[in-house]
Amino acid sequence: AAIVEHTFHVGNLTVERLGQRQVITAVNGQFPGPKVEARNGDTLLVRVVNNSPYNITIHWHGVLQRLSAWADGPAMVTQCPILPAGSGASYTYRFNVTGQEGTLWWHAHVSFLRATVYGALLIRPRPGVPYPFGPAPHAEHTLLLGEWWNASATLVDVERQAFLTGGQPANSVALTINGMPGLSHAHKEMHHLRVARGNTYLLRLVNAALNYQLFFKVAAHNFTVVAVDACYTDPYHTDVIVIAPGQTVDALMHAGAAPGRRYYVAAQVYQSIANATYSATARALLLYDDAEDAKIIMSPRMPALNDSATAQRFYGSLTGLLRDGKPTVPQRVDTRMVVTYGLAIAPCLPAQTLCNRTRGSLAASMNNVSFQLPATMSLLEASRSRSGGVYTRDFPDRPPVMFDFTNAAAVNRNMSLMVTSKGTRVKALRYNETVEVVLQNTAVLGTENHPLHLHGFNFYVLAQGTGNYYQIHKKKNLVNPQQRNTIAVPAGGWAVIRFTADNPGVWLMHCHLEAHLPFGLAMAFDVQDGPTPDAMLPPPPNDYPPC
Ligand code: C2O
């Protein structure tokens, strides 16, 4: 195993897209940021130096952070931020990627900065170890799907505005593939993928968009999905990939399309809510070595904006690859939870000067708790130093009442229940406890497909569907379920996930639609140390940022 070292200088970068120059926050003057490449078993040391005007933290999305919770990155959950330029502040994230292979990514985890502060984190098998799928790819292409804003205000101001008004932050003006919208016919600002005819490529897809689930296609090409969220899957053949913010997909693509043409690669918004109007598409160009200047360019036929059937077919078809034929799902469950989640109404906070005082502000909650980040100390630090007053360990195991969560009329009758309380409430777990969580979407202000991300663990997806889980008896897959770190729970539906709490620390679970995190669509698990030193979180590193 090797040590992989990087230094990330976070600072301002001027970028021009769609005819406008924007000052964005970026790492090492690159947008998207630098690619971090490692092998299973390596140790990563990433020193983050903050030269930007904002508080910064970096999260290693999908890294299990075994016994290294201090390096996870969400602001005020596992650390206080690295202070802005002038403070000379830095922090070295130190963790290993043992037992993990596939495509992950890193992103800022404070305010809305992940809009432009993100990059790929690729973990390859140990030297000499082949992939557990075939054919072996000749080469690979990493495609980071994102968004672009023409807002003259900085993204941080966009967020502040949203907070003050209790409304939605500004929509992006374009989607991007590797930072490029690919809209212009002159093919400027378009990412190019070069392939040699007859070869097979491993596409590593990351949805780094703030707020949009995406359909991904390449004209005249099919895919074989081999991993999601850096967890191997049984090979799944498809012509469309569905990917929610936070999710990753590894897929093989054979370069065997008709000669004499060029092919568009497209990422288009998938909207699960009714009456959605944002329908952006980003494009890249697939170029064969023998047809780089071909006149004809083929476009993929994209699904309809609200094609939930295609999304559900994709997500419902994936199964986990059993490495030695034996199921790895924990069969015994210690703790069962039902967690409702969705948008909600919350009373205005004093700082929300533009909030409608009688109607309240738009919020979101899990089990009717709208999650608030602490202000004085990170949850992890508070947990480890046994400091009181920072959070309470009473996150409810169930919603206050069971009713028809997916029926808007029923929700309206129970509206008083959907007016949330704000709080910093976490669920305490013993070391090695197995936890099964039913995630149930609610229909407050309409249903919407929310990608829920769990830090610190991969979980098994045992079943998923639409409607109310407690009224449905659907068989759980306890043999070969897909594993993930982010699940796009169906709109107006549910999913059952299971994981073993074998990693001490405080681990956030939240909606990866960025607008919903400050609304409070989050909770956290506080996992205690185990009995032996190899099950205990060591003390924080010396350069751990103070508050
Ligand atoms: Cu990718 Cu808590 O985030």
Image (cartoon, rainbow, N blue to C red):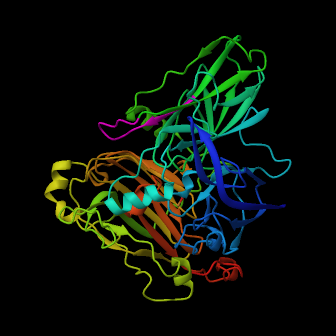
Residue 427 highlighted magenta (yes or no): no
Mark yes or no: residue 471 visible. yes
Q: Quadrant of the N terminus?
A: bottom right
Residue 277 highlighted magenta (yes or no): yes
Q: Nearer the viewer, residue 310 or 8?
A: 8
Picture quadrant of ligand 1:
bottom right
Left or right of 324 in this view: 392: left
Whole-percent x, y for residue 413 in the image: 13, 57
From this view, report whether residue 206 is shown above or below residue 107: above
Whole-percent x, y for residue 338 in the image: 35, 62
Q: Nearer the viewer, residue 532 or 540?
A: 540
Left or right of 7 in this view: 80: left
Magenta range is 266-278
Left or right of 103 in this view: 396: left
Residue at image x 77%, y 54%? 38
Q: Quadrant of the C terminus?
A: bottom right
Mark yes or no: residue 398 visible. no
Whole-percent x, y for residue 320 in the image: 58, 46
Residue at image x 55%, y 78%? 380
Q: Main secondary structure of the magenta part?
A: loop
From this view, report whether residue 385 is shown above or below residue 63: below
From this view, report whether residue 540 is shown above or below residue 44: below
Residue at image x 73%, y 55%? 28
